[in-house]
Image (spheres, rainbow, N blue to C red):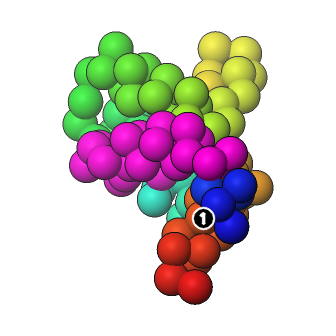
């Protein structure tokens, strides 16, 4: 277990920081609920400006919790299911 915790600590730190913000948490939850969300939908959901949305999306993508795919001028966001599972496994290990 100790090896797993050490290897994953950097990822857990980034992911935890990413979801510590109410806007990023709501973005993550909306992406999980819908499967895919565009940045314009994120703007509508949060009421934030486009630059602010870009900032939050960047933090979420750098944490590896979401994946952004550019399609023309639109950026669509999806959950990185493997990384979310990895985060979940980390927290499960804490309760063993």
Q: Residue at x 25, y 49 (%)?
A: 22
Q: Quadrant of residue 38?
A: top right
Q: Residue at x 42, y 48 (%)?
A: 16
Q: Residue at x 72, y 28 (%)?
A: 69
Report the span colored magenta.
6-28
Q: Nearer the viewer, residue 86 or 5?
A: 5
The residue that label 1 is drawn on is 90
> What main secondary structure does the magenta stretch of the protein show?
helix
- Residue 75 visible to the viewer: yes
Vertical relation: 29 (above or below) 48: below
Residue 18: image x %, image y %?
Answer: 41, 40
- Residue 79 visible to the viewer: no
Q: Residue at x 37, y 41 (%)?
A: 17
Q: In the rendered image, which quarter contains the C terminus?
A: bottom right
Looking at the rendered structure, the number of numbered marks drawn on it comes to: 1
Seen in the image, is 63 located left or right of residue 52? right
Vertical relation: 84 (above or below) 93: above
Furthest toward the bottom, the residue is 96
Packing grade of label 1 (10 A; few <14, some 14-19, many >=20) is some
Residue 90: image x %, image y %?
Answer: 60, 64
Question: Magenta span has 21?
Answer: yes
Vertical relation: 41 (above or below) 12: above
Residue 40: image x %, image y %?
Answer: 45, 31
Residue 45: image x %, image y %?
Answer: 33, 46
């Amino acid at each position: 277990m100790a090896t797993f915790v050490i290897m994953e600590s950097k990822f857990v730190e980034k992911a935890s920081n990413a979801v510590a913000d109410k806007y990023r948490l709501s973005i993550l939850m909306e992406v999980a609920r819908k499967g895919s969300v565009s940045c314009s939908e994120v703007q509508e959901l949060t009421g934030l400006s486009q630059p602010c949305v870009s900032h939050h999306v960047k933090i979420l993508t750098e944490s590896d919790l979401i994946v952004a795919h550019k399609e023309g001028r639109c950026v669509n966001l999806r959950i990185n299911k493997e990384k979310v599972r990895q985060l979940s496994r980390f927290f499960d290990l804490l309760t063993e």
